[in-house]
Amino acid sequence: MVESSNPEPTARQDGSRYALSNLFRTSMLPRLALIGVVLLALAGAFAATAGWLSPQRLTPEKIVARFEEYNGVHPGFRRNHAKGVCVSGVFESSGEGAAISRASLFRPDASVPVFGRFALAGGNPFMADSPAAVRSLALNFALPDRELWRTGMNDIPVFPVKDAQGFYDFLAATRPDPKTGKPDPAKMEAFLKAHPEAPAALKLITGRQMAEGFADATYNSLNAFEFVDAHGTETPVRWSVMPVDPPKPDAAPEEGENYLFDALAGELESAPLRWRLVATVGEPGDSTSDPTIPWPDGRRKVTLGTLTLDRVEDEEHGPCRDVTFDPLILPDGIASSDDQILSARSAAYAVSFREREGETKEPSAVEIANPGSDAK
Ligand code: HEM
């Protein structure tokens, strides 16, 4: 047998010893140290992104926990806009939006099925309906080629704060003090000082003309988005859903904990309800990042089409319970803007959804006996 002159064993002879001896050659040590430093830096960056190194950092989990502190935990229900009903119908395009957005639902003659949800803002699914309750309409448009557009809109003219931290602080400041049943004025004062955009926005919100019910309300996207046309040109927009021939307000006194929902169900059972979907086009200088600032009157409006709703169901039986109306579920032709609330909403809705989907469901406060007609 011929002895090898090579003092090092080959990998075939002893893989582990070979590898180890190579690794611990003195020339490798600086390289190893460098790899270690890079790995540590990467781990630090991940930890910082996840918020582990800055416990004060606002996360979607903390936001959802704040809704739960405010309203209590109601298993199976949305952590905000908890009380609601499902509706469905159709959206028919006017063709007028096609010049500013290449989204297929704005093409002339496009008609797409829609389902949605009317709700009241707030995390208590058993709250009593009241004239001042903020009403919302969320919609899911099912476009061809399995594209979806989801949007959640409120019947207020602007949002009270310009970012997620503001909303988080707003919830703490407006939470009723258990001793008095009212928000603590000192906390509210501190909040208004810390968020200088809020006083003007709250003035617009509290001074708004309130609708009688769900059917005669106008619902606004509040956040801005970008419409993208066939050439890739972006146009800033905010959109609204405005009632067409709303039913006459009921002269009878408001009775019952669910009077707003009962009236809506009655209206939908007797005839379809129609709204116009309208885009307001922003001009240079109009803020797209701050939903507390209204755009000046007189901005160009584009009627995108008509929404007809003709069916109402309770959450247990309808299509809207097990979805989340994430504002960043957008089709080609509609894009996010520079408003950071949009990504904060998207993340918080996902946390709320994850929590409620894992919980046992109980029936909603609003039960619909006879789903509305299917008449178109
Ligand atoms: C930082 C700001 C915001 C936070 C943290 C937030 C949080 C939430 C959460 C956790 C839900 C429940 C989601 C689910 O379980 O599916 C929700 C629902 C909703 N939010 Fe927001 N929201 C914010 C801003 C807004 C804004 C600006 C609008 C504008 C119109 C809005 C409209 C709605 C609507 C309509 C719903 C109910 C959707 C449905 O019926 O499922 N939110 N929000």
Image (cartoon, rainbow, N blue to C red):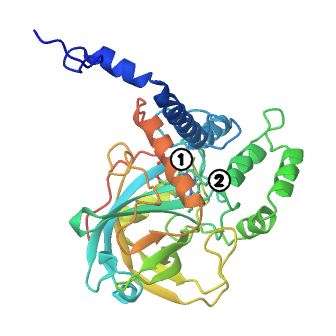
Residue at which label 1 appears: 348
Q: Is residue 189 in view?
A: yes
Is disc 2's CB within 8 Å of ligand 1?
yes
Dot 2 and dot 1 residues touching (CB under 8 Å): yes
- Of labels 2 and 1, earlier in sequence is 2
Given the image, on which type of amino acid does mark 1 rest?
Answer: Ala
**x then y, percent, for residue 269:** 35, 62
Query: Which quadrant is the C terminus positioned in?
Result: bottom left
Q: Is mark 1 within 8 Å of ligand 1?
A: yes
Quadrant assignment for ligand 1: bottom right
Observer-nearest of 33 and 366: 33
Q: Position of residue 280 (x, y in %)?
A: 54, 82
For the residue pair 159 and 320, the one nearer the viewer reads as 159
**Placement of 281 over or under 145, stated as above or below:** below
Residue 241 appears anywhere in the view: no
Q: Secondary structure at mark 1?
A: helix
Distance between the alpha carbons at the discs numbered 2 and 1: 10 Å
Q: Which residue is mark 2?
A: 164
User: How far across and down, in percent of the image, does residue 42 sit?
Assistant: 53, 39
